[in-house]
Image (tube, grey):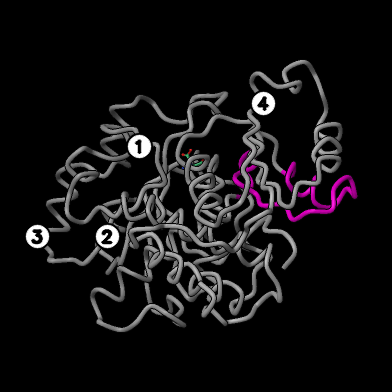
């Protein structure tokens, strides 16, 4: 694995290896001194052409915990806002000898272009490109699901897939790179994935996706769901009206207090996930977001461990080893 562009490129063994290393990295996060020397003397550039809070802070924390030198490059205030192209930016990074590039970009395919153009030689990590992919988000979701299952069964997380779990991904699938990357990764790990969405917010060509589709959230909740992943309504990517009103959306597709009470009444072990930022009162009620079922903050914590793991695998060889003794 030279780059991490999409979860579709991962093998099952690679995915489990990244998750296992992330578990080791999590142990570092619980120490008093939260730092490893693994990337000392290496330079990692965070190239953010699109707004981000969580993902940018998470990558930066991960890089610093591995002792890398970190350069943050936001499109606003850089020459990009003066019209500099991706190619010129990439060549500048190559000239300063960056060891890895983390890129978020509004255009689907920009990270792949960077990785395959020959402009740069360092590994590229996709931190979210347009509506296409967000692989580290899917990996942190998988890590969170693995922990959830381990808490329920008492079985160790390490080495295990997610075989046998059922997860509903609910809401604005059409505009969601989080949903796309999760569909591929979760199905690779053996999860039964149910997409729950209004027909207007579902991509047209999903016949070859390894998913089931349900147009009724209440019906979906009657399945034995191990987790329900609520997606943000991505207004910034909507150029048309996809649902009648916010109230109507919340009533039909939101995780309302009533739906939460239904899960509680059934005694279901359904965990609640959301990639953030949350629109409280729209796709998720405050009651759901703050309930004991919510693993939203675990997702944020796990994001750092997963990104440490990905950087570690891409920047230290030999790739694919299971030797964590140096951590
Ligand atoms: C997601 C993203 O940017 O794709 N958020 C994130 O990475 N924390 C999801 C979203 O914006 O809804």
Q: Nearer the viewer, mark 3 or mark 2?
A: 2
Specify whether tag 2 is near ligand 1 (CB below 8 Å). Answer: no
- Where does residue 110 sit, x and y in percent of width and height? 74, 41
* Mark 3 → mark 1, Cα distance in angstroms: 25 Å
**Residue 75: assigned label:** 4
39 left or right, relative to 118: left
Residue located at (35% from left, 37% from top): 278
Quadrant housing the N terminus: bottom right
Residue 128 on the magenta span: yes
Residue linked to disc 3 = 265
Q: In which quarter of the image is residue 148?
A: bottom left
Image coordinates of residue 296 in percent, x first then y, are 32, 50
* Dot 3 and dot 2 residues touching (CB under 8 Å): no
Q: Distance between the residues labelled 3 and 2?
A: 14 Å
Secondary structure under tag 4 reads: loop
Which of 89/317 is in front? 317
Q: Residues under labels 1 and 2: Cα distance?
A: 16 Å
Q: How far apart are marks 1 and 4 (CA)?
A: 24 Å
The spot of residue 212 in percent (x, y) is: 47, 63
Is 294 above or below relative to 235? below
Sequence-first disc among 3 and 1: 3
Which residue is found at the position 81% from the left and 46% from the top?
Answer: 97
Is the CB–ligand 1 distance for label 3 below 8 Å? no
- Magenta-drawn segment: 109-133
For label 4, count other residues whose C-alpha is less than 10 Å away and answer few (under 14), some (14-19) or many (20+): some
Mark in the foreground, 4 or 2: 4
Where does label 1 land, which residue?
Answer: 278
Residue 234 lies, in percent from the top left, at 48, 33
- At a point 68% along the width and 62% down the height, the residue shown is 315
- Residue 116 vertical placement versus 321 (above, below): above
């Amino acid at each position: 694995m030279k780059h991490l562009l999409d979860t579709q490129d991962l093998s099952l063994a690679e995915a489990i290896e990244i998750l296992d290393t992330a578990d080791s990295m999590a142990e570092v996060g619980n120490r008093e001194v939260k730092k490893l020397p693994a990337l000392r003397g290496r330079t990692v550039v965070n190239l953010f052409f699109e707004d981000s809070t969580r993902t940018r802070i998470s990558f930066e924390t991960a890089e610093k915990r591995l002792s890398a030198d970190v350069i943050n490059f936001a499109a606003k205030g850089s020459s990009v806002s003066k019209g500099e192209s991706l190619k010129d930016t990439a060549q500048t990074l190559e000239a300063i000898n960056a060891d890895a590039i983390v890129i978020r970009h509004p255009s689907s395919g920009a990270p792949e272009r960077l990785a395959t153009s020959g402009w740069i030689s360092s590994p590229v990590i996709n931190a979210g490109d347009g509506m296409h992919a967000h692989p580290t988000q899917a990996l942190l979701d998988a890590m969170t699901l693995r922990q959830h299952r381990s808490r329920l069964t008492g079985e160790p997380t390490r080495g295990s897939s997610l075989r046998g779990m059922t997860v509903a991904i609910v809401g604005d699938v059409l505009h969601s790179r989080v949903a796309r990357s999760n569909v591929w990764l979760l199905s690779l790990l053996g999860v039964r994935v149910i997409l729950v969405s209004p027909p207007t917010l579902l991509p047209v060509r999903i016949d070859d996706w390894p998913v089931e589709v349900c147009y009724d959230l209440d019906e979906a909740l009657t399945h034995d769901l191990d987790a329900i992943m609520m997606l943000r309504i991505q207004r910034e990517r909507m150029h048309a009206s996809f649902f009648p009103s916010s109230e109507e959306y919340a009533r039909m597709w939101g995780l309302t207090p009533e739906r939460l009470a239904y899960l509680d009444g059934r005694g279901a072990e359904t965990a609640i996930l959301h990639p953030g930022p949350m629109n409280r009162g729209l796709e998720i009620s405050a009651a759901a977001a703050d309930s004991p079922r919510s693993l939203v903050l675990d997702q944020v914590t796990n994001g750092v461990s997963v990104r440490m793991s990905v950087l570690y695998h891409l920047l230290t060889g030999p790739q694919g080893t299971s030797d964590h003794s140096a951590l």
